[in-house]
């Protein structure tokens, strides 16, 4: 088998999948109120119960992760706001890259490429909007001044509309796009097993690979250490 | 079929509250324990158990105390904000004009409570689970308790001893109400008004008032909240479009990118 390098540590992967599961439930139980033809599924209110259970998981998971993984959290948040010239290069190359699989067009990317960074920044911001508006509705629905609750409903919807299409893009680009095949080597594997093949890391995240593993062949012991984890 | 309506004449109401009792009795709504707040007005507010309530308005006229009473219950709007925002269609328009409500379809989302310009629907809910149901006056069209379908008058109208409430074709009641308001004006009540004729494209509860609507605590110009229009008329359609475009765009990308990758792989194989 091809040598592999580590992309995501286990706590990060667990957080990702708990969040992914919770968000999927939140998305679907919200969707039934969003598409008129699906409204009947919400009858009786059981979707609200699911929505609240998932909302609790959505908030509790990072609340546990952050204090236990403080450095990783800080690094991640810093990454979300670290934008530069190479992001313009990504944007210019993206159509050729994603439509015509022209991997040569793409300038070297860091641990997160520009697209991943956009998604990650959106997740951070919209999670905040979801949290604040959701909490107000949870605690004060039908009790707080109607004008306030109306705005909360609207903002919750704005966050929903902002995040749902991007969620489709996220799932597609990490698991379905032809360049992400075979799944065992690439993006899917990085979140499922935490590791990717060395050639995938080099071709998709060259800047990061060079920074962490050096430009030449990785030292033999380092590689075995990564593999043994 | 001709639209129906209730006409409430504030000048004939003595606030006996028989309508409140008849409503609870017919609809099987329990009483509420309340505190004496120094007024005969009771219970203090509408609730999921109280669908109609007389509000007592105290004022002075020429130095003498004046006491008037105004009916508080669903207005059965033609342009009803609650129907617009209800995601399960538990709230709907009856062919006779009233706004019907089927509790078995209610999800308890509470949107109707927060968007009604009259703050009529009410909901009890569990703070932790959020489970609950909205409730409001259905003008006696509730499933299984449909007096209108059976050819009866609403319970409140049937029981009213002074004729302050009447139930008939809406057009007839508009004419009747207009005549009564003109009579009041002729008696010197310059501000007398008929409320509900045109508000929200026409309410199905009309009010004969011997003063302006504001004096009775009714909104002078009720509207479906702008937030409801922005949400249902603009934001959600944009959401459907963006979601649909994303799916179509990704499918298109998949087809194009897969062909590109295949031809690259084929070219690489030929070079070997």
Image (cartoon, coloured by chain):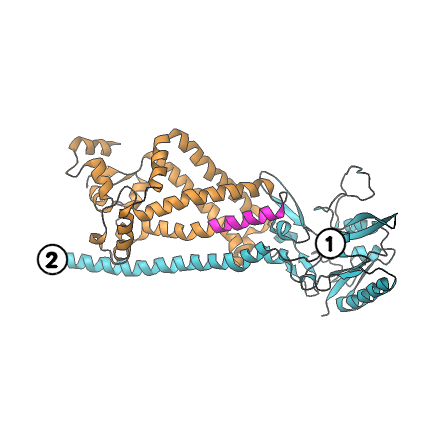
Left of A83 or right of it: where is A31? right
Using the image, determine if residue B209 lies above or below residue B122: below
Toward the bottom, the furthest residue is B1
Color used for chain B? cyan
Residue B233 in sight here: yes
Q: Is residue A79 above or below residue B100?
A: above
> In the image, which lettered chain appears orange?
A
Range shown magenta: A142-159
Q: Nearer the viewer, residue B191 or B173?
A: B191
Observer-nearest residue: B227 or B85?
B227
Q: Residue furthest left?
A: B272
Say which of B68 and A100 sits in front: B68
User: Which residue was labeled with disc 1?
Assistant: B218
The Cα–Cα distance between marks 1 and 2, rounded to whole angstroms, is 83 Å
Q: Position of residue B145 (x, y in %)?
A: 73, 55
Mark seen at residue B271: 2
Sort mark 2 into few (<14), some (14-19) or many (20+) by Cα contacts within 10 Å.
few
Q: Position of residue B251 (x, y in %)?
A: 35, 59
**On the picture, is A13 further left or further right than B237?**
left
Q: Mark 1, mark 2: which one is toward the viewer?
A: 1
Please, what is the dominant secondary structure of the magenta stretch?
helix
Residue B88 in view: no
- Letter of the chain that mark 2 sits on in the rendering: B
- Mark 2 residue element: helix
Q: Earlier in the sequence, mark 1 or mark 2?
A: 1
């Amino acid at each position: 088998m091809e040598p592999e390098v580590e992309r995501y540590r286990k706590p990060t992967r667990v957080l990702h999948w708990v969040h992914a599961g919770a968000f999927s439930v939140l998305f679907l139980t919200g969707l039934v109120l969003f598409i008129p033809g699906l409204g009947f599924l919400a009858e009786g209110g059981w979707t609200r119960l699911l929505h609240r259970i998932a909302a609790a998981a959505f908030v509790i998971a990072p609340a546990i992760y952050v204090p236990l993984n403080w450095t990783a959290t800080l690094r991640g948040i810093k990454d979300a706001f670290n934008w530069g010239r190479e992001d313009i290069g990504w944007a210019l190359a993206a159509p050729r890259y994603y439509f015509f699989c022209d991997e040569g067009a793409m300038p070297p990317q860091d641990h997160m490429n520009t697209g991943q960074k956009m998604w990650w920044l959106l997740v951070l911001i919209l999670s905040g909007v979801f949290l604040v508006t959701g909490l107000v509705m949870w605690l004060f629905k039908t009790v707080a001044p109607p004008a306030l609750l109306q705005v909360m409903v609207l903002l919750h919807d704005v966050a929903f509309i902002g995040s749902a299409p991007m969620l489709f893009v996220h799932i597609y680009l990490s698991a379905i796009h032809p360049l992400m095949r075979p799944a065992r080597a690439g993006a899917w594997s990085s979140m499922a097993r935490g590791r990717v093949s060395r050639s995938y890391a080099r071709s998709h995240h060259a800047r990061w690979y060079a920074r962490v593993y050096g430009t030449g062949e990785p030292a033999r012991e380092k590689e075995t250490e990564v593999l043994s984890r | 079929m001709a639209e129906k309506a209730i006409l409430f004449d504030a000048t004939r109401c003595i606030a006996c509250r028989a309508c409140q009792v008849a409503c609870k009795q017919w609809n099987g709504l329990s009483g509420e324990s309340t505190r004496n707040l120094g007024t005969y007005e009771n219970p203090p507010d509408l609730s999921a158990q109280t669908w109609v309530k007389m509000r007592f308005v105290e004022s002075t006229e020429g130095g003498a105390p004046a006491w008037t009473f105004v009916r508080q219950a669903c207005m059965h709007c033609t342009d009803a904000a609650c129907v617009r925002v209800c995601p399960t269609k538990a709230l709907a328009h009856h062919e006779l004009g009233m706004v019907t409500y089927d509790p078995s379809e209610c999800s308890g989302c509470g949107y109707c409570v927060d968007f009604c310009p009259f703050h009529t629907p009410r909901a009890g809910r569990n703070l932790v689970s959020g489970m609950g149901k909205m409730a409001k006056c259905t003008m006696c069209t509730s499933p299984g308790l449909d007096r209108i379908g059976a050819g009866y008058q609403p319970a409140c109208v049937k029981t009213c001893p002074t004729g302050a409430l009447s139930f008939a074709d809406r057009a007839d009641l508009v004419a009747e109400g207009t005549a009564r308001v003109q009579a009041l004006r002729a008696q010197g009540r310059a501000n007398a008004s008929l409320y509900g004729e045109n508000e929200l494209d026409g309410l199905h509860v009309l009010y004969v008032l011997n003063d302006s609507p504001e004096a009775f605590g009714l909104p002078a110009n009720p509207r479906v909240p702008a937030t409801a229009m922005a949400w249902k008329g603009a934001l959600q359609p944009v959401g459907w479009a963006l979601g649909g475009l994303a799916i179509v765009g990704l499918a298109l990308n998949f087809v194009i990118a897969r062909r590109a990758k295949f031809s690259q792989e084929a070219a690489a194989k030929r070079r070997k």
